[in-house]
Amino acid sequence: MMSYQSLPPGPPESRIAQSIEFTYRPFEFLSKCRETYGETFTLRMMNMPDMVVTANLDFTRYIFDHPKIFEASEANKKTQVDLALGDTFLMALGGEQHKKMYAKLKGILDAAIKKCKPDLRRLAINRINTWEIGGRFDLLDEVQFLALELMLFVLLGDDRTGNRGLLVSLFHKMISTSHVDGQPTMIPNAGQYMLYRQQIYDLLDEEIRTYHPVARTQTKDVLLTQLLNPSYCDPVGSLPHATIRDQLLSMTVAGYDTTATTLTWALFHTLRSPDLVYAVRQEFAGYLHDPCPERAPGKIINKIVTETERLHPITPVVNRITTEDREYGGWYLPKGTMVCPSLYLIHRNFCDSPDDFCVERKQPRLYPFGGGNRKCVGMVFATQELHYLLGLIISLTELQLIERDTFTLRRGFVLVPANGVPVIYERPLHNVAC
């Protein structure tokens, strides 16, 4: 029989105080806890079970390798993502339901990125062509619009209902409810958020209702087509419209906001270094006029994206919850304990000068897309999108950073650059057709 031991030590402040620190200063709070209590410590926050946070790589691997003991779907529900994005979306599913839906969605997205590069290029160039020479804008806003347009194209295909512009606007308004006095925050304005979400649901319902099977040969690679018309051997089978709608909503939000944020950070670090800008342009030169490159851009772009993912994880921790009593490393973890590998701390464990951006460093084991059987379903799609858009934007435009420094703020579930990365668009570098 296990001997009852306490959870790892942690800060003594109240749940309210710890919740405020984790919400508004997550990186500073986690770093201070690690320095004070070691690689594994316990946080206690409002409306949450005790949270055992770890930066230990062995413990992290153990958690990811034992998904039945450290369960994800119930942990995600504790953070109320099911209330935000629907209770039948992928992150809220567990067991066989999750396994089958994950395999289906991953297969669709992995195939989609290989076929939609001409569309990615077209959308990117169309967006760039709206920029005013000499004009000032925030890169985060522009990249978000681009990533959202691409995600909706992959999920829904061409605009059949005439509502695509309205959908884009509503998604941005819904995400922007996670602002207070113009600054991002963890907690959205619930009333506004739910209002915009219902309007998005209504438009997605119209997309589903007006879908025409006769057009399937032209849209067979679109996610909506494959959700509405599963093959005879599809293990997921037919789905209720509400479930399809939840997948469309959650895949859009998760697919565009996270990718856009990482790309913005990558552009920010690249633009701070003339040497990196030159290297990216040299490397991407062979792809600039190719609407459908067979291979991904090369080493320097990969290094920039990898170092960006190390330095700027989208979320500070990954959530799991224990389904049984468990002992590990001398600590006793009762059933129902949140166990949370911290991507932010893990990615800094094995680096000299871990807070510096350095593309030449030997990278530690990274988990930018999570781990185990809950790794991000859009990992392949997002990675290729990041590589291609980074090369394309740097190669087509001369952008000047207005502010060379920024810091990280939480907006909803995503950690974003606080200033949005303002730039001046000095001039186009090439006249490239879509």
Image (cartoon, rainbow, N blue to C red):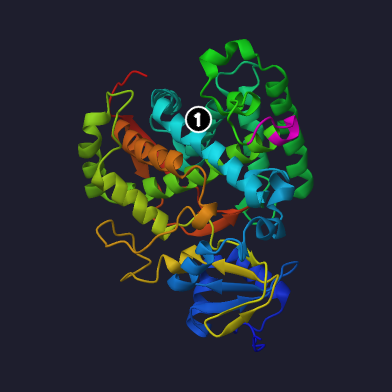
For the point 69% across and 71% down, the residue is: 45
Q: Is residue 348 visible?
A: yes
Of residues 415 and 53, which is closer to you in this image?
53
Determine if the magenta segment contains residue 240.
yes
Magenta stretch in the rendered image: 236-243
Q: Amino acid at mark 1?
A: Leu
Q: How many marks?
A: 1
- Within 10 Å of disc 1 (Cα), the crowding (few <14, some 14-19, many 20+) is many
Q: Answer with left or right where residue 383 lies relative to residue 282.
A: right
Determine if the magenta segment contains residue 231.
no
Residue assigned mark 1: 150
Where is the C terminus found, in terms of image quarters? top left
Residue 53: x, y in percent?
56, 72
Measured along the vertical axis of the image, is residue 46 above or below residue 36? above
Q: Quadrant of residue 225?
A: top right
For the point 65% across and 32% down, the residue is: 237
Where is the N terminus found, in terms of image quarters? bottom right
For the point 60% across and 42% down, the residue is: 100
Q: Residue furthest top?
A: 214
Residue 311: x, y in percent?
41, 60
For the point 20% across and 38% down, the residue is: 282
